[in-house]
Amino acid sequence: MTQLSQRMVELGTAKSEIREAFAFAQARAAEIGPENVDDFSIGNPSVPAPDTVAQMVHQLVDTVDPILLHGYTPAQGGWRRPPGPWPTI
């Protein structure tokens, strides 16, 4: 039998905003129908991203240094914002 560390058990049973959002979406889908609920809490969305999101992704890929855009951070847990103003559509 596999033993889980206490920390893993805590992580799997602790309160989670994502789990709460998922539970809310499931309950709402039961009320008004799953076709009327866009649940983006867990997994991949089942609908395409809005055009503005796709446009921004293309703009970022075309204009921002790839290392700054999606390279690894220099240290665990950090995030580097690309220099300059944010692109706009």
Image (spheres, helix red, strand yellow):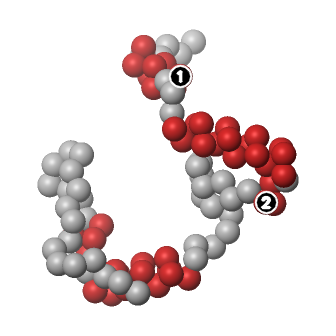
Residue 71 higher or lower than 1, as above or below? below
Residue visible at 53% across and 16% down? 2
The local secondary structure at tag 1 comes to helix
Residue visible at 85% across and 53% down? 33
Q: Position of residue 87 (x, y in %)?
A: 31, 82
Return the residue at label 1: 13
Quadrant of res 10: top left
Q: Quadrant of the N terminus?
A: top right
Q: Nearer the viewer, mark 1 or mark 2?
A: 2
Residue visible at 21% across and 65% down? 81
Q: Which mark is residue 36?
A: 2
Q: Amino acid at mark 1?
A: Thr
Q: CA distance from mark 1 to mark 2?
A: 29 Å
Q: Can residue 67 be seen in this snapshot?
A: no
Q: Amino acid at mark 2?
A: Asn
Q: Position of residue 38 (x, y in %)?
A: 69, 59
Q: In the picture provided, is 76 more to the left or to the right than 1?
A: left
